[in-house]
Amino acid sequence: MDGIGPEFLGRLLDEHGDALTLYARGWCDAPEDVVQEALLQLMRQPRIPQRVVPWLYRVVRNGAISAARAAGRRRKHESLAAFGEDVWFVHPSGDRLDALAATRALRELPEVQRETIVARLWGGLAFEDIAELTGTSSSTAHRRYEAGLAALRERLGAECPRK
Amino acid sequence: MSEEMKRVRKSEVGSRNELEGARNDESSAFRIPHSEIEQALCSLAPRAAQLDRDRLMFLAGQAAVPQASQECELAADQSHQVDAVSSLGARWGWPVAFSAMTALAASLLLVLLNRPEPQVIERVVRVPVEVRRSVAEAADAPEQADRFVVDAARTERAEYQPPSGDSYLRLRNRALALGIDSWMDAVRSPGFASEERPASYRELRDSLLQ
């Protein structure tokens, strides 16, 4: 059987669900719905994709962009604050980078840089995968990643702990 | 299922190796300034997705069912395809034959209704009349020959007239007087028909009154 089993789905959800949700947060208000729909779309596939995780990121990206477009008009009439001051991260110890500050800094990044950093740091994708995901070259993806990190370092410099 | 898990593990291991390899391979010029911020960001865990696991599994099962049912339907369609082809002739044979025969009958009816009427061709047929005079006499007097032909035609016409009422009365009287045998002799006599002439109404009345 080439289909997806429940164990495989549970494992994907445990190991990549949060990162996928974080990735979808960059575009839409309801990232959980997008991730759930991506997982269901994976279940509908007659065969497992060759590379499941990049495939999931691609589906989540497309779904999140579509959801953002669908909610675009509604969002115009809402305040930006209502769009979300929710925190994207949690830190158990709380002694390192402030989760809220990181969320704000990440949200202020350009979309392409934010997408690249999330896919790279929390999604664990290679630059080739990110390049394929965003429709650019690997060098462009790498350049965006470095630029995004530089911007985050500049914005989070005070919060960033010194070793 | 074990193959799936192997593939997942392989994918995950590959992803981790790619990440670590990319980090190691990157030049120190890029790595050193951002290592701290990378580590700091990596220490942050994404907020847990508020996904209802049970509902997701239920929906995933629903999503997987149509796929299996489609495969079953496909197999069933393939198995029934032969039967469908064989029954196709029986199902469409009679209707096709009926339609063809109906069309043929309708076309023949149209041809029959639109058939042109037969043409009436009038021809003058000249029938030669038997000439009783000799050819030599006719050659001597051509004017008289034509007249003789007309007279002969009139004579023939008179000979074919039916027996008149007078002859009937004569036959009856003769049969009553002499018997039925005398009637047969009278009919067989050669001058019986030729001697008769048409009986007028007056003659018939007088014969009846006698």
Image (cartoon, coloured by chain):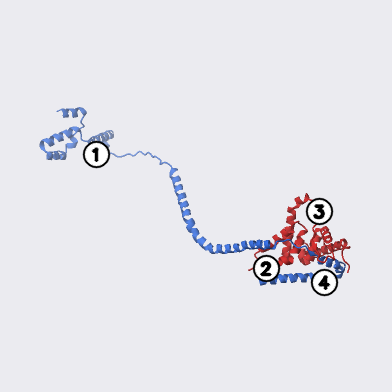
User: Can the viewer see residue B54 in this picture?
Assistant: yes
Q: As shown in the figure, which amino acid type bears the numbered disc 2?
A: Glu
Mark 1 is surrounded, within 10 Å at the Cα level, by few (under 14), some (14 to 19) or many (20 or more) other residues, namely few
The residue tagged 1 is B134
Q: As shown in the figure, which amino acid type bears the numbered disc 3?
A: Ala
To which chain does the residue with label 4 belong? B
Q: As shown in the figure, which amino acid type bears the numbered disc 1?
A: Ser
The answer to whether A111 appears left or right of B186 in the picture is: right
The residue tagged 2 is A7
The residue tagged 4 is B24
Q: Do callouts 2 and 1 point to residues on the same chain?
A: no
The residue tagged 3 is A81
Quarter holding residue A133 = bottom right
Q: As shown in the figure, which amino acid type bears the numbered disc 4?
A: Asn
Marks 4/1: CA–CA distance: 148 Å
Q: Report the chain shown in red.
A: A
Q: Tell me the residue at 57%/64% (across/down).
A: B75
The color chain B is rendered in: blue
Single out the mark in the foreground, 4 or 1.
4
To which chain does the residue with label 1 belong? B
Q: Do callouts 2 and 3 point to residues on the same chain?
A: yes
Q: Do the residues bearing badges 1 and 3 touch, measured as CB atoms within 8 Å? A: no
To which chain does the residue with label 3 belong? A
